[in-house]
Amino acid sequence: MQPQILFASIDNCCFFKLRGELRYTNAAGMDELIEQLFSKPASCNQVIIDLNEATFLDSTHVGLLASLARYCQQQQLPKPTLFSTRPQINELLYSLCLDQAFQIVEKPTSADVKLSGVTAASYSEQQQGEMILRAHQALIALNDKNKAEFQPLVDLLQQQLTSR
């Protein structure tokens, strides 16, 4: 099976390639990578994401993308560039207003970058719940429409995580 999340950092440009079906069950590796990259300043001056081979993104992965955009904004970096040629993926991105946080390019990427597979992190059930919560908080922080749609889930996740 091919890795679903690939990454390269070249001259402070962080390049992500996501492929296949991306669900919360395989999101821990990307979550961990994002935390590592942005826990120290200036490891990424530009972020590029290639979704051309992604066939499905659940809300957790969209939330991870939103958190990438938020980190870029906090570090006063340019908007991340997101490449996607799949109509169903683009429809999802626009419906969740990711075009406000990303420069979306509906074309294939021409980057010839040597990418490495991101190892899936092994999260406990608690850590996975916290990751899903953070991803959805990033998603609702984008705009009021997302807040209305995902706030009940965020409230439920917070309630479940505090009751453990």
Image (tube, rainbow, N blue to C red):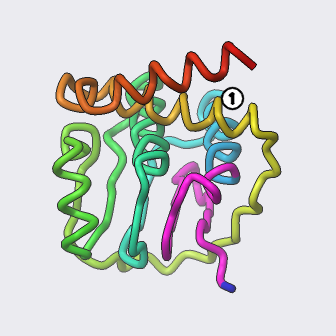
- Of residues 120 and 77, the one nearer the viewer is 120
**Residue range of the region highlighted in magenta in the rendering:** 2-28
State the image quarter where residue 76 is shown: top left
Q: Is residue 10 magenta?
A: yes
Please state which amino acid type lies under the numbered disc 1: Lys
For the residue labelled by badge 1, is the local secondary structure a helix, a strand or a loop? loop
- Residue at image mark 1: 40
Residue under the image location 54 percent in, 29 percent down:
134
| Position in image of residue 143 (x %, y %) | 22, 26
The C terminus sits in image quarter: top right
State the image quarter where residue 8 is shown: bottom right
| Position in image of residue 85 (x %, y %) | 25, 75
Say left or right for 151 vs 8. left
State whether residue 13 is above or below residue 41.
below
Residue under the image location 33 percent in, 31 percent down:
150
Say left or right for 152 vs 22. left
- Of residues 40 and 2, the one nearer the viewer is 2
Residue under the image location 53 percent in, 59 percent down:
23
